[in-house]
Image (cartoon, helix red, strand yellow):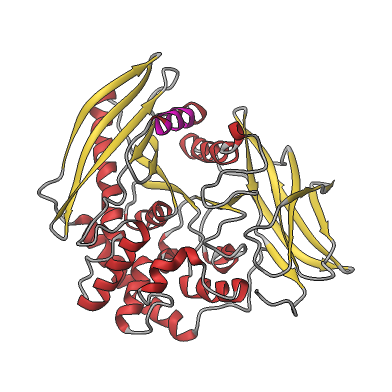
Amino acid sequence: MSLRNQPVLPSVIAFIGISLVSDASWADLEKYVRRPESKFAWTVKGKNTRSDDRIYDLHLVSQTWQGITWQHQLQVYQPRTVSPSSTMLLWVTGGSARPAHAFLGLELARKIGAPVAFLFQIPNQPLLEDSLREDDLIAETFVRYLESKDETWPLLLPMVKSVAKAMDVLQAFGKQEWGQPIHGFVVSGASKRGWTTWLTAAVDQRVRAIAPMVIDTLNMRAQMSRQLEAFGAYSVRLGPYIRRGLLPIPETPEGQKLLSMVDPWAYREKLTLPKLIINGSNDFYWATDALNLYWNDLRGEKSVLYVPNAGHDLLRQDSAKSDHLAHLINSLAAFARHQISGRRMPDLTWKHETLSGMLRLVFESNPAPTGARLWVARAPTQDFRTAKWEEQAVSFSNGIINGEVTPPAEGYVAFYGELDYEIDGLKYHLSTQVRVTGNAKAKPE
């Protein structure tokens, strides 16, 4: 049994609107992705060998969008100890390749035990007349869709297509370089690239599993209502959408269509593949318990990881600098290792309840974890974005794990469970949902 934040739900009208148009919007997305691209091409630009670790540097032309040719770097990382696999982790990111990417790619490949690929320049930017980037660029393309009704305008469509074309390239590269077919991919990316990850999985069956990061905004209409409740206003990080009148998305046929095209929640019936959702406990973009507005709607195998005391960059601030990304890297690598080896992720269930005046979290796991704890934060309002999360012990009894938290006399408390696991000697973590509760009289500042 899991936790849903019942008071904040999409309106009946919005729900019906998404339900009616989601199939058509899926067809629009798939049609765009499948559309032939005359300029599609790829080449191997070079192979760099470092202590017998190989880094392949590929160049990809994915498509022409609104008269603009999209080009990408695509790098493949193969440590000397790693052999090719029929399933590959594909990390989707922005910008250009840097030495830090090679370090991260090789580290992931070693921990996974298979080569890893990074796709860059998602999206191509700056673009359009004002040389826009990131959210300003996405917001502009949304406005242009609403004004023109041209379904190819939303930037997420070419972003998804770039990933599909990268998978085409990697399959051809695998046959050419290794004589090894690549049949499936574990796709991952952060923020807008996590958004792209969700949507790519909805239209491409080569995606066997996904690990979207810090895009805790599925069920978007409900998420915006939750932000108003928790913060008293929309997150300032969503400023590009606020300035263009996109929050909330207009209640027009075009607005409903746009929402159903770009909100992964609208594709939830198609997203039955294994998924690991990775969030930071202090992400300034989203409400702390945003997951609760869509978790119960997700089908198939699903897991969640909260990185404690980490923001949108997922850098854990309560650990040594050398370990800032360890929480993320180990759990992502373990998830990919599970998918490549065909082994299921741990079966973890939990229940939040109030018993004898105490806030209680009960969770069970198969296999049993090697360790567990609660992470607890307190704040004067429901805004926990600057709160410090602290560990609290739990008890083990007959395979059941119990954690208790004292309700706050004033303000609010947020908490979740974290469990430790191992696969082939690789230690990693999984989490439960977050519960936020407290003094209902407290108001957002």
Residue 163 position within the rendered picture, expressed as x and y whole percent measured from the top left:
30, 48
Furthest residue toward right: 356
In the rendered view, tell whether residue 392 sits above or below residue 350.
above
Q: Is residue 169 above or below residue 263?
A: above
- Dividing the picture into quadrants, the one containing residue 34 is bottom left
Image coordinates of residue 165 in percent, x first then y, are 24, 46
Apparent side of residue 250 relative to residue 276 in the rendered image (left or right) = left
Which secondary structure dominates the residues rendered in magenta?
Answer: helix
Where residue 12 appears, x then y in whole percent? 48, 85
Q: Nearer the viewer, residue 286 or 263?
A: 286
Q: Which region shows up in magenta?
A: 100-108
User: Where is residue 110 shown, x and y percent of the image?
Assistant: 48, 26
Residue 413 higher or lower than 338, as above or below: below
Which image quarter holds the C terminus? bottom right
**Considering depth in this image, is 351 or 416 the residue closer to the camera?**
416
Asked if residue 233 lies left or right of residue 36, the reply is right
